[in-house]
Amino acid sequence: MYGDSLELTDPHTWRNIRRLRYVQRKDWLEKNLKDLIKILEKLPLENLEPWQILGQSCIDDNLYQEAEQIYDHLYHKTQKCHGDTGQAAYYRGITHFLQGRFQDAYKDFKLSRQNDLQSKTFSGPSARAIAYMEETLFPTRDIIHRNHDKLVKDINIPRNLDHIMGPNQLRTIHKWNSASPLYSRGISQGGGYFLTLKNSSGHTKGIAIDPGYDFFDIFRDIGLGIADIDAIIITHDHDDHTESVEGILSLLAKYNDYNEQHKTKVLDIFGSAGTLLKFHGLLSATDLFGNREINFKLLIPGSEITEIEGQSLLEKHGFTISVKPAFHTECWTSQESAVGLVLHTTFPDPKNSDNLKIGITGDTHYKIGLGREYKDCGVLLLNIGSVEKEEGKYLTQHLGMLGCINLLKEARLGKPLLAILTEFGEEFSGKREIISRILENWAQPMSGGKKSELRVIPADVHLEVRLSDLNIRETDTNVFFPYNMIEIDESDPEVLRYKFSG
């Protein structure tokens, strides 16, 4: 079939096998292997060249099982004739190694090493192979096994949400904004927010909001894990609001593979159009048994989100969503498809007669009337971004100082409001407290009279708000105090501390 250059029955011609094209050579070896081994068995043991020609050709062409058969026959033939089995054992070990059968390979290399020692060969290839496996491969595999065992153990840590935080709490897991965590030399954690709410069944549910840089690291330091996250809300697709999403979803997959209850955990994800495009390849994820791991709901300005996959959000998570406009260009749509949000909770607003509403502006520049979208909120997460850089001009992608002031005036002029100021650029280091007081003062009504309970509190990773009474945890004592009795200690510009003002 292949001409006179390669004859099946003539071992002298086998050295011409390299002249064949890869596909022809592979086909010839696979098709004729049984006959080739029979011919090899009849050759005198002193003539090892045909064995090596065929064995090494199989190894070079990734035909490891075929090469194993050749060297296995050579080993037993040599052993039967009381010859030196070292070479056959070594090459058989190579075929085992390349199949990932490391223990079999290790045994073969030790057999080969025994023959080397008998012949007083102390630095042969078997010695190097054994050293590699003992000093590198096996220790590395042990580390991998230990890390995997630790991962499985960590994944199976029981849900800790009620013990660590409890229901109706808001934590900012956030320090600086934008791309600064990528280039900063300081403590430049991005992050987002974490909200706990009690659903209609009385269960505490955990909602991650805009989980950006380092979100999960900070989250884990609090003492929480993947079992404590039930939903993710994403206002837009920029990395500082989404960087930890892929890591959370990776842990979700591991949790569903290895949790001791053998139950499929499902995350509900609410996201903008850019978020949908950015993560569309992950949103159809299923567990080992084909069960869906993710439900996704698209956030469109003007819409009201009250259910997901036919299940009431109030019953499932304890909130509904009013989707608000935001004017901030997304990467994956190149349009202003970012969103703001108002979360409607099920418990009373301690300062008003209605249930508490939590506003989240997301990243947006200011437009007249935008603050009216948040006029009924008792808590407002306000993203400043930066300060105005040009005279008489608002920022084009963020609120800035003037946008924050105008939005606050439109939202709650003369009414109680707790505004949490976030999304600081690192140029705000040492200035977060004063900027917050400026916004607070300028957003007060000009008409005088009794001052409203408007407070603007700058956020850091330590900030925790108890939503049932809008009290804030004091950093040093862990005691909660009313938000209008909290002052900010920025003596260390890297770390804000929240203190009772007396």
Image (cartoon, helix red, strand yellow):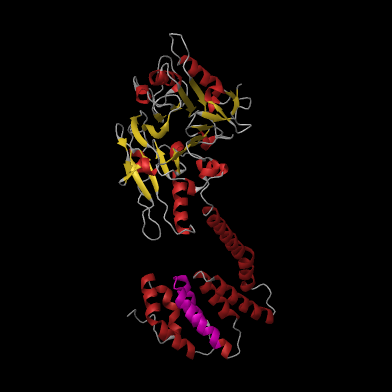
Q: Nearer the viewer, residue 362 or 116?
A: 362
Quarter occupied by residue 399 = top left
Please check the rendered image and state whether residue 63 is part of the magenta-colored stretch, yes or no.
yes
Q: Nearer the viewer, residue 395 or 301?
A: 301
| Boundaries of the magenta span | 50-77
Res 260 seen here: yes
Most prominent secondary structure in the magenta stretch?
Answer: helix
Left or right, 52 with reference to 300:
right
Q: Is residue 37 above or below residue 263?
A: below
The quadrant of the picture occupied by the C terminus is: top right
Image coordinates for residue 93, horizontal then vertical, percent = 55, 75
Res 53 seen here: no
The quadrant of the picture occupied by the N terminus is: bottom left
Q: Residue at x 51, y 82 (%)?
A: 72
Image coordinates for residue 28, horizontal then vertical, percent = 38, 78
Quarter occupied by residue 142 = bottom right
Q: Residue at x 45, y 24 (%)?
A: 351
